[in-house]
Amino acid sequence: MFKLGKHKVEFYDSIDSLPFDRFNSFNKFVMLDAELGSDVIAFDQKISKMFQFLGKEMITEATGELYNLRNTYHNIMNGNNVRGLAFACLIRKIDGEKIEDYSVENMKSILEKLSVWGLEIGKVKETTDVLKKNLKRN
């Protein structure tokens, strides 16, 4: 659990304690983040990789990277920060109220609320990275 101002955010104790559907959603968003990303840094990485492939005349690979770039752009423009969505999957309660609706729209709403309360991207990255590492160990 951590506090954002006067608010308390409680997480599931471990990956193993996540409800099955939430675990699947967490995995999906973590995989999308690893493959596509959803920020300007990921966008720039895709462009760099595409130019590397083109420089080596690896057209098929460059085309695949262009497709990924398109999806990264789509995520950015639609406000789909997939790492943030993975983070939201881990939240059990906010101010003692259990989260029941894990639709993408509600998770985005939760992230907006937490942001207003002071959630920083560093906390999102730290929390998801710790749990990703735990997944690799199991």
Image (spheres, rainbow, N blue to C red):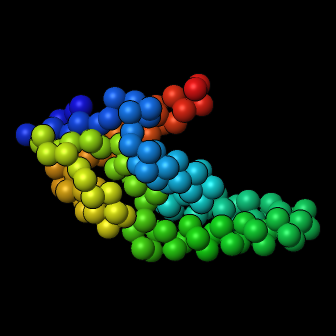
Residue 70, position as x, y percentages in the image: 61, 74
Quadrant assignment, res 73: bottom right
Residue 104, position as x, y percentages in the image: 37, 64
Please tell me which residue is depicted at 60% across the width and 31% down the height of the picture: 136
Q: Is residue 116 visible?
A: yes
Residue 25, position as x, y percentages in the image: 46, 53
Q: Is residue 8 left or right of residue 123?
A: left
Please tell me which residue is depicted at 39% across the width and 39% down the height of the picture: 18
Up the image or down, 82 lies above or below 132; here it is below
Up the image or down, 73 lies above or below 49; here it is below
Please tell me which residue is depicted at 58% across the width and 51% down the height of the picture: 31
Q: Quadrant of the N terminus?
A: top left
Up the image or down, 4 lies above or below 28; here it is above
Q: Is residue 4 visible?
A: no
| Residue placed most toward the observer, 25 or 84 | 25
Residue sticking out furthest to the top: 137
Please tell me which residue is depicted at 32% across the width and 67% down the height of the picture: 105
Q: Is residue 69 left or right of residue 53?
A: left
Q: Quadrant of the C terminus?
A: top right
Residue 103, position as x, y percentages in the image: 34, 63
